[in-house]
Image (cartoon, rainbow, N blue to C red):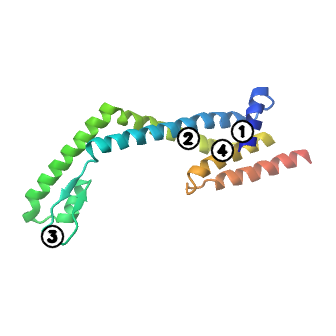
Amino acid sequence: MTAATRLLTSTLQESQDTDPLILLWQDWRETFTSSQRLCHEAQRLERELAEKIGFPRVEIPLDDPGRPSVVATDARQIDRVLGTAPATRSLRRRLKRDLAASQARWDAEAAAVGLTSAVEREAAADRRVDELLKTVSRTPARSIPGVIAKLAIATEWSELEPDADGYPWDFIRGVLADLTALTAKKT
């Protein structure tokens, strides 16, 4: 990756190549770096908030003392654990109110410490990363540095998302087509 980065950076600086994949690679590096930074920021803020007030949740009291306690983070979980019998109606309502209050406190604190906006910025950067991945995988290379750019993106992405749908196979298929076309032009 270091050699590929050096070659692509040099190609950009010397304006040797008009391959659109070189410019996409540059955009990718900036966007992907930003996405990772925003992810770490959101995780840090979430961790700090969880340490300060805890995640939104309620503990469901159980009649059987031998069973471990059950924690609900969603109103549907309360109904699944307690059922919907009339005998549990008031308890379910109270737990759902408590959970809603806990969620409201979390939401207010998340907005106050910047977590909400950090998550929104991270999601926007992730959407841009996805757009770039699709564009790069579909853009034919016009040169060997373009092929290297495509492989560099696929490699960097695959290191963090090894199970991502279609990646790196979309890239590998594209690179195979690129190399075949570039070789056919030379013969």
Q: Rounded to the nearest whole Å, what is the CA distance between mark 4 and mark 1?
A: 10 Å
Q: What residue is disc 3 on?
A: 65
SS class of the residue under badge 4? helix
Q: Rounded to the nearest whole Å, what is the CA distance between mark 3 and mark 4?
A: 55 Å
Residue situated in front as seen by the camera: 173 or 9? 9
Q: What residue is disc 4 on?
A: 153
Labels 3 and 2: the sequence-earlier one: 3
> Is 94 above or below relative to 136?
below
Q: Rounded to the nearest whole Å, what is the CA distance between mark 4 and mark 2?
A: 11 Å
- Mark 1 nearby-residue class (10 Å; few <14, some 14–19, many ≥20): some
Q: Looking at the picture, which amino acid does disc 2 mark?
A: Val
Labels 4 and 1: the sequence-earlier one: 1
Q: What residue is disc 1 on?
A: 5
**Position in image of residue 86 (x %, y %):** 8, 64
SS class of the residue under badge 1? helix
Does the residue at mark 3 contact the one at mark 4 (Cβ under 8 Å)? no
**Position in image of residue 143 (x %, y %):** 80, 40
Q: Rounded to the nearest whole Å, what is the CA distance between mark 1 and mark 2?
A: 18 Å
Q: Rounded to the nearest whole Å, what is the CA distance between mark 3 and mark 1?
A: 61 Å
**Is residue 104 shown left or right of residue 26?**
left
Residue at position x 72%, y 39% in the image? 5
Q: What residue is disc 2 on?
A: 129
Q: Nearer the viewer, mark 4 or mark 1?
A: 1
